[in-house]
Amino acid sequence: MGPLLIDVEGTSLTQEEKELLQNPLLAGVILFSRNYQEPNQLKELIKQIRDNSSQRLLISVDHEGGRVQRFKQGFTLIPPAQSFAALNDLPQAKSQAFDAGWVLAMELIAFDIDLSFAPVLDLGHECLAIGTRSFHQDADIAYQVASAMIDGMHAAGMKTTGKHFPGHGHVIADSHKETPIDNRDKSLIEQDMQIFAKLIADDKLDAIMPAHVIYSAFDNKPASGSSYWLKTVLRQQLQFKGIIFSDDLSMEGASIMGNHAERAKAALEAGCDLLLACNNRQGTLAILQQLAELNKKHNLQSEKAKRLLTDTKVTYDELIHNRDWQLRHNNLMKLNEKWADHASGNH
């Protein structure tokens, strides 16, 4: 397998996409809301992806809950991360976060999807890109609740991706639209990073996604393209042995690293194992061309992505008749209602 995950345009594959999926430099596919109409269509799209790929690709989606949940109709609506500790005492928050991790993972696995990019480990709710996606502003509470969600995902047989290293929660700008700069002191940024450090020490993170944020006290490059953050800190100091994903290289936050091909090269050189390229087909094709050139000099083929594949087997019908699913689904629906009341009361 190669290092690149790509997107597809619609609810079924185009002829171009069927050919693209044969490219040996691909590692997988990431899905979005535009790829989903209803459960049977999703099942057929996944089957098309599987049938047209030359190897078992990693099929992934951002499906963490709250405002970032790509599939809704026919799926349990996962409450936003902030809701667990905001509306419950800590033991109950952890119990519900476990349920959420288990349910989101099992439902995706029932459609033959391997990975949701979760959980978000950024602290606080002020950042426009994060907001309710953060578990808490208090590092210890966030750590405990995130750890419970991870346990739920792992119990279902899904790997986890902690994001956005070393912490995206204290920049107001949105890295989807620009390259944010965090100008705080080193000590504050290192405090934000501790949730990642603790979960790495607990051996709970299978993958990590760095932020498209510049931490000026340390480096003049965004963490996603910085060998300081990815090699010196993540690999050497924190001893992280898992997969490092780039965040989407088409985001404006990555534009400081150059054009699409240059961004891919910079991310690989900085220490990323797998790259995401979404929402810009010409950019994706430029990256594939760049990877083909790089592959002539250094073999980019790797088995790393296979470590993130799930081996849980369950059908959707089996799942919705499962007593654990029914109880957890109902608990999460009640929490959604409480959160809606809470949110409307705050405005």
Image: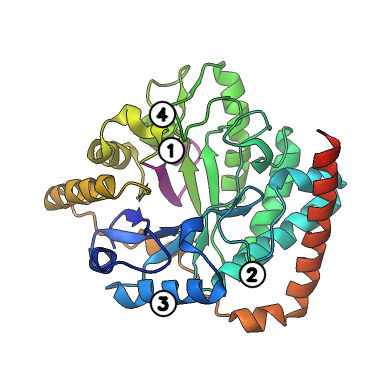
User: Which numbered marker is on residue 47?
Assistant: 3
Instruction: Identify residue for label 1.
Output: 236
Residue 266, above or below 81: above
Q: Residue at x 72, y 82 (%)?
A: 321
**Between marks 1 and 3, how big is the CA–CA gap?**
40 Å
SS class, disc 1: helix
Nearer-N-terminus badge (3/2): 3
**Between marks 3 and 2, how big is the CA–CA gap?**
18 Å
Q: Are marks 3 and 2 in contact (CB under 8 Å)?
A: no
SS class, disc 4: loop
Whether residue 32 is visible = no
Q: Nearer the viewer, residue 139 or 201?
A: 139
Q: Residue at x 70, y 48 (%)?
A: 80
Q: Are marks 2 and 1 in contact (CB under 8 Å)?
A: no
Residue 75 on image: x %, y %: 64, 66
Label 4 CA crowd tier, 10 Å (few <14, some 14–19, many 20+):
many
SS class, disc 3: helix
- Is 201 in the magenta? no
Instruction: Identify residue for label 4.
Output: 222
- Residue flagged by tag 3: what amino acid is it? Lys
Residue 159 on image: x %, y %: 54, 61
- Residue flagged by tag 2: what amino acid is it? Gly
Span colored in magenta: 234-249
Whether residue 41 is visible = yes
**Between marks 1 and 4, how big is the CA–CA gap?**
19 Å
Taking the image as shown, residue 343 lies to the left or right of residue 175, namely: right
Q: Are marks 1 and 4 in contact (CB under 8 Å)?
A: no
Residue 107 on image: x %, y %: 61, 70
Nearer-N-terminus badge (2/1): 2
Instruction: Identify residue for label 2.
Output: 74
